[in-house]
Amino acid sequence: MSLQLRLFGGGKPAAGKISANDGSHAIDKSKVLASTDTSVITPLNPGNFSSIRSVPVVPDPRYFDREQADKLKELAKEKTDGARQSKRAYKALTKIEVADKTVHKEHRKYEGAVAENELGKKRSDAGLAKKLHGMRPGYARLGLGIDKADSDARTRIDAIKAKLTGGSK
């Protein structure tokens, strides 16, 4: 088995797990670029360009009587107040959008830091794993030395036993 296969695994990742150690990714561009809401304005969803028209357009010059003029004046007052309140509401909605964007951006920064630090942690783990692999021959030498010392001790003990019991096996 090649060193690369031993280090990185020789096949498919475990069921349900995606392995990042082969350069793969699970970043779905369509998810990254998906709108935060289906009604949000984007180049792919430009909205309907509708407008508001409280009264129909007067197509030709005309005269209005007093009653019509009074009703239009009252409607103008209502619409002016409605516009003032709408302006306040849209201003508040815009502030909410700005706040949402700030929270969104800061959360993405946080997630980026988590991802970056995870990579740093994994680099550190990989460095330790490499260091430990480098120590294996030393441990093997120590183990062989202990085995040899054990064997030498058994040989000497057997010799002493043989000498004390006066016979040989």
Image: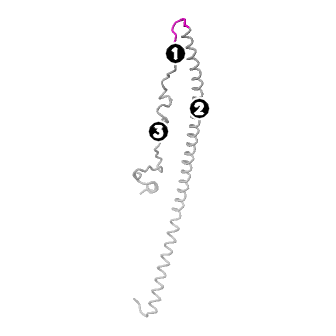
Span shown in magenta: 55-65
For the residue marked with disc 3, what is the amino acid?
Lys
Residue identified by numbered label 1: 55
Circle count: 3
Question: Regarding mark 2 in the picture, which secondary structure is present there?
Answer: helix
Q: Residue 9 location, x and y as percent?
A: 43, 54
Residue nearer the viewer, 75 or 143: 75
Q: Residue 151 location, x and y as percent?
A: 46, 79
Dividing the image into 4 quarters, which one contains the N terminus? Answer: bottom left
Residue nearer the viewer, 141 or 92: 92
Residue identified by numbered label 3: 31
Q: Residue 142 location, x and y as percent?
A: 52, 71
**Drawn side of residue 5 relative to residue 80, left or right:** left
Q: Residue 137 location, x and y as percent?
A: 51, 66
Q: Marks 3 and 2, Cα distance to the nearest angstrom?
A: 29 Å
Residue nearer the viewer, 156 or 39: 39
Residue identified by numbered label 2: 92
User: Magenta stretch: residue 58 in it?
Assistant: yes
